[in-house]
Amino acid sequence: MHKEKKTENFDCTDVEKRVQQFLDGQLDDTETTLIYEHLDHCLPCDKKIEFEKKLKEFIRLKAQEKTYPQKLEEELKNLLK
């Protein structure tokens, strides 16, 4: 007896578990399609994906800025030691 892989639909929990992988393009074609299908009818998940996408972009842009407190750099270096 073997377990069948769930491929019919994704629910909100499935999307939540995979949101970062989805945004990073790390899911296979089947999972990506299932997420898009879920987003077509689930406004809360669609809004969450859009929020996470914007947050990632904001963090990426902020990380590229050269202005940050010297103390932050020192604290990060200490954490990495």
Image (tube, rainbow, N blue to C red):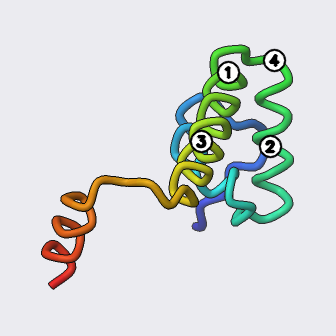
- Give the label, 3 or 2, closer to the camera: 3
Q: Residue at label 2?
A: 34
What SS does tag 3 mark? helix
Q: Is disc 2 surrounded by few (<14), some (14 to 19) or many (20+) residues within 10 Å?
A: some
Q: Residue at label 4?
A: 41
Which mark is on residue 71?
A: none
Q: Identity of the amino acid at label 1?
A: Lys
Q: Position of residue 77 (x, y in %)?
A: 21, 76
Residue at 57%, 38% (x, y): give it. Answer: 55
Q: Is disc 1 surrounded by few (<14), some (14 to 19) or many (20+) residues within 10 Å?
A: few
**Contact (CB < 8 A) between labels 4 and 3?**
no
Q: Quadrant of the N terminus?
A: bottom right
What SS does tag 2 mark? helix
Residue at 37%, 54% (x, y): give it. Answer: 68
Q: Identity of the amino acid at label 3?
A: Phe
Q: Position of residue 15 (x, y in %)?
A: 62, 39
Query: How many numbered marks have been drawn onto this rendered protein structure?
Result: 4
Which mark is on residue 58?
A: 3
Q: Identity of the amino acid at label 2?
A: Leu
In terms of sequence position, does the residue under pointer 2 or pointer 1 come before the other? Answer: 2
